[in-house]
Image (cartoon, rainbow, N blue to C red):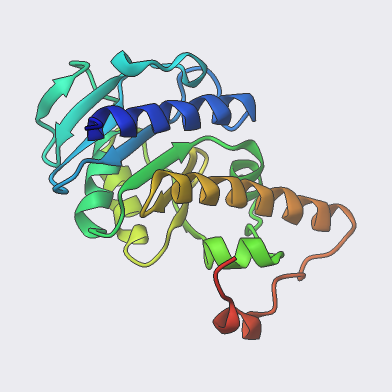
Amino acid sequence: MADPLASLIDELIEVGRDAARRGLVLASAGNLSARLPGGESFAVTAAGTWFDRLGPGDFSVLALDGTVLGGHPTPSTEWKLHARTYEVRPDVTCVIHLHPQAAVILDACGHEVRLITLDHAYYLRRVVRVPFAHNGSDELADTAAEAARDCDAIIMGNHGCSTLGDTIAMAYRRALQLEDAAESTFRCLSIGDTSATFPPEALEGLRHL
């Protein structure tokens, strides 16, 4: 019988390495987590881990209150961001926190990341922005968790983004769609367009792709 923790960590490792290859995170920036069966604990990348070098020993297992239950003894400084999101979203089993350049830079320049394509609209629905707060702080964890109550894609000002999902694959798909939406928004701005979006009236009719 497969070990659920080992299976989740293997999937997070694959996501982390792919994110590094795509340039969505540099060096040891960013962090990944997945909720364990039962819902009261989660695995999160350890402090200082590089996504392109992730291995099974690079994860800590924590209770939602931050108690280290196993694995690496030093979890990511952003563990509160993950824990508090899980507390307000019992349906979420994965939180992916990356530092994608297009989304963060557009936001820093005062431009909203627009949902333009069918995929953007279906997988993201909406993107919420929260102001800058220092990494690892209660302020960052609390504001991001509050935004996550009714949103699966959050941009943290001058910092990064978090995407959520009921599976690791869905959370990562949303991370990819968020950066694609940011790059599409940049292309629109580069030709002078400031208004193109997916038709709002079509949102309700979207079906599973």
In the picture shown, does residue 9 fall above or below 137?
Answer: above
| Vertical relation: 199 (above or below) 97 | below
Q: Is residue 25 visible?
A: no
Give the quarter of the figure containing the N terminus.
top left
Residue extending farthest to the right is 191
Q: Which quadrant would the C terminus be assigned to in this image?
A: bottom right
Left or right position of 40 against 193: left
**As drawn, is 172 to the left or to the right of 107?**
left
Query: Residue 141 appears in which quarter of the rendering?
Result: top left
x and y percentages locating residue 173 in the rendered image: 54, 48
- The residue under the point 63% across, 36% down is 101
Residue extending furthest front? Answer: 1
Q: Is residue 106 left or right of residue 143?
A: right
Residue at image point 56% right, 75% down? 207
Q: Is residue 42 visible?
A: yes
Image position of 179 with respect to 191: above or below: above
> Looking at the image, which is closer to me, 199 or 118?
118
Percent x, y of residue 184:
75, 53
Residue 27: x %, y % from top left: 52, 17
Which residue is at the front of the view, 192 or 65? 65
Q: Quadrant of residue 72?
A: top left
Q: Which residue occupies the extreme bottom position in the image?
A: 201
Number of numbered callouts drawn = 0
Residue in view at x 40 percent, y 51 percent: 164
Closest to the observer: 147 or 181? Answer: 181
User: Residue 206, percent across and down?
Assistant: 59, 77
